[in-house]
Image: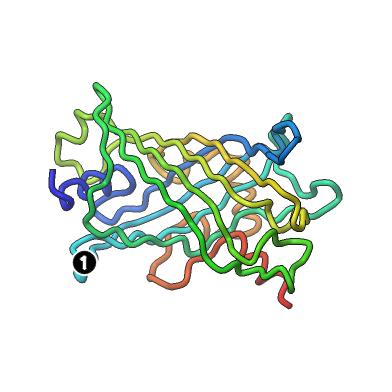
């Protein structure tokens, strides 16, 4: 398949070619790791992304406009946390969380009746939270993380011409300690391990989660109307809440 054909099928899996809003919902856990310490499950994690595609005539690909919200949970009760070790929890409110999709050879693996698209995204850039300004919240002046995505779609659905196909996904992320955890330069970090699905609509998001969003940031129930830059992250959002 050509890069354009691969991107066409990936775009149908990740979103919808007709510009309709698509909601992905996921759930999982967050584990801590640190040298000479046992791995620990410190949080549950649940989130969603609401996205829509528009054609990018400049590249022949797409622009994905999205917002995403995600919440740290008690690892046992799965209730949304407001504090952790007497510190206020700062949940994920990333708006925008946009993505340019240019034609490229998207890794595609045939798995019998399923097709898997995978994306490996290593990140390394100057931290929005310099250690000199945020000594309790930042592990380094360089932000480093690794995001690993897999999207699974039925091969039979991809053989058709529908603008959107059913899909499930898995996601893993290796990251530094979260800024609000106040771990300073302690060695180690976090591993996120989640799985999720493309929903029929935002109304299929669990009621508890929809109510939490509606009470705090109801705009996260919809994708953005216009492309804006730059993207928000947990680190830039924390900086906005705690300017220096």
- Disc 1 element: loop
Q: Quadrant of the C terminus?
A: bottom right
Q: Nearer the viewer, residue 121 or 226?
A: 121
State the residue at coordinates (72%, 49%). 187
Q: Quadrant of the N terminus?
A: top left
Q: Residues within 10 Å of mark 1 (few under 14, many from 20)?
A: few
Q: Is residue 21 above or below residue 143?
A: above
Q: Position of residue 168 (x, y in %)?
A: 39, 34
- Image quarter of residue 30: top right
Q: Residue furthest top?
A: 112
Depth check: 36 or 154 in front?
36
Relative height, residue 126 to residue 208 (above, below): below
Residue lying at the far front of the rendered structure: 36
Residue at 35% over, 41% down = 118
Counting the numbered discs, the total is 1
Indicate the colouring scheme. rainbow
Residue 150 x, y percent position in the rendering? 39, 38
Q: Quadrant of residue 113?
A: top left
x 79%, y 55%: residue? 88
* Viewer-proximal residue among 88 and 122: 122
Residue 172 coordinates in the image, percent (x, y): 51, 40
The residue labelled by disc 1 is 59
Which residue reaches farthest right? 86
| Left or right of residue 243: residue 54 | left
Q: Position of residue 91 (x, y in %)?
A: 66, 53
**Horizontal side of residue 45 vs 120, given as left or right:** right
Answer above or below: position of 18 versus 243.
above
């Amino acid at each position: 398949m050509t890069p354009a054909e691969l991107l066409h099928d990936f775009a149908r899996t990740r979103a919808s070619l007709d510009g309709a809003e698509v909601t992905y919902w996921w759930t999982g856990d967050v584990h801590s790791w640190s040298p000479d310490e046992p791995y620990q499950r410190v949080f549950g994690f649940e989130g969603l992304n609401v996205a829509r595609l528009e054609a990018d005539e400049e590249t022949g690909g797409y622009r994905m406009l999205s917002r995403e919200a995600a919440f740290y949970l008690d690892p046992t009760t799965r209730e949304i946390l407001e504090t952790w070790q007497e510190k206020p929890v700062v949940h994920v409110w990333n708006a925008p969380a946009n993505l340019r999709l240019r034609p490229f050879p998207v890794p595609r693996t045939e798995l019998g009746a399923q097709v898997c698209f995978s994306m490996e995204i290593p990140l390394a850039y100057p931290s929005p939270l310099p250690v000199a300004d945020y000594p309790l919240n930042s592990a380094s002046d360089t932000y480093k993380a690794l995001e690993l995505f897999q999207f699974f779609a039925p091969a039979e659905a991809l053989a058709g011409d529908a603008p959107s196909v059913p899909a499930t996904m898995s996601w893993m992320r290796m990251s530094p300690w979260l800024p609000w955890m106040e771990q300073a330069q302690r060695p180690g970090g976090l591993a996120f391990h989640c799985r999720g699905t493309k929903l029929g609509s935002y109304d299929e998001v669990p009621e508890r989660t929809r109510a939490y969003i509606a009470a705090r940031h109801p705009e996260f129930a919809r994708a953005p109307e216009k492309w804006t830059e730059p993207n928000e992250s947990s680190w830039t959002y924390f900086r906005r809440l705690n300017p220096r």
